[in-house]
Image (spheres, rainbow, N blue to C red):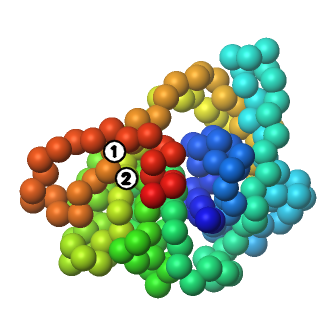
Amino acid sequence: MSVYVIGAGAIGTLVSSSLTKSLKVNFIVRNANKLTNLAKSNNCFTIKRLYDNEKIMHYKINNAFTVDQIPDSNIDFLLICVKTFDTIKSLTPILDKINNKTRILLIQNGMGVVDELYSTLWKKNEDRPTIYQGVISHGIWQAPEDANTYNYNHAGFGDLKICEIPRDLKHITDNKIIEKDEIINN
């Protein structure tokens, strides 16, 4: 199964680092310059663990694409780490690749995105993908000298909490915390 990541910045690459061990992770990037930057490193990125004697961890993604180059006709799993106000704009060009079997994990600052997705993109419950919301407490940032690369500093080890968002927000009765493996393997 392929995983696509929109928003492969600090949080997107941090979460991707764990996924690259067992899945084909693909970044969806904004422009050809981002593709060029990844190609220079052979689709690799690094995360320096500041809390672990500055140990540098190397990771490799399967590939990177602009929205018009995505080879799969359907996206099985989509990780979204863009700013909340960019979510609709980021998803719109790939809507034809998302269906009710797609799983989407949102890891973003801000609230109200799911309401906006449902009211704007997927008005019918049966058309909606399965959406998960993640809250992350890791500290990660990019040093100025690493601009235009995919190299980040992991400043503080935290956790990631994930819950499944119901397709129908009118009948919320249960909040269920689930493990990341359950999301990916279902």
Q: Nearer the viewer, residue 77 or 50?
A: 77
Q: SS class of the residue under badge 2?
A: strand
Label 1 vs label 2: CA separation?
5 Å
Task: Tell me residue 90's x, y (percent).
Answer: 49, 69
Question: For the point 37% across and 52% down, which residue is it?
Answer: 132
Q: Is residue 91 above or below residue 104?
A: below
Q: Is residue 20 above or below residue 153?
A: below
Question: For the point 69% across and 50% down, which residue is it?
Answer: 22
Binning the other alpha carbons within 10 Å of mark 2 as few (below 14), some (14 to 19) or many (20 upward) gives many
Q: Amino acid at mark 2?
A: Tyr
Binning the other alpha carbons within 10 Å of mark 1 as few (below 14), some (14 to 19) or many (20 upward) gives some
Q: Is residue 110 among what the camera can see?
A: no
Q: Is residue 169 left or right of residue 64?
A: left
The answer to which quarter of the image holds residue 128 is: bottom left
Q: Is residue 7 above or below residue 65?
A: above
Q: Which residue is the site of mark 1?
A: 163
Q: Is residue 50 left or right of residue 100?
A: right
Q: Is residue 51 among what the camera can see?
A: yes
Label 1 or label 2, whichever comes before in sequence order: 2
Q: SS class of the residue under badge 1?
A: strand
The answer to which quarter of the image holds residue 84 is: bottom left
Q: Amino acid at mark 1?
A: Cys
Task: Tell me residue 61's x, y (percent).
Answer: 75, 56
Q: Determine contact: label 1, label 2, CB under 8 Å.
A: yes
Q: Nearer the viewer, residue 101 or 155?
A: 101
Q: Which residue is the site of mark 2?
A: 132
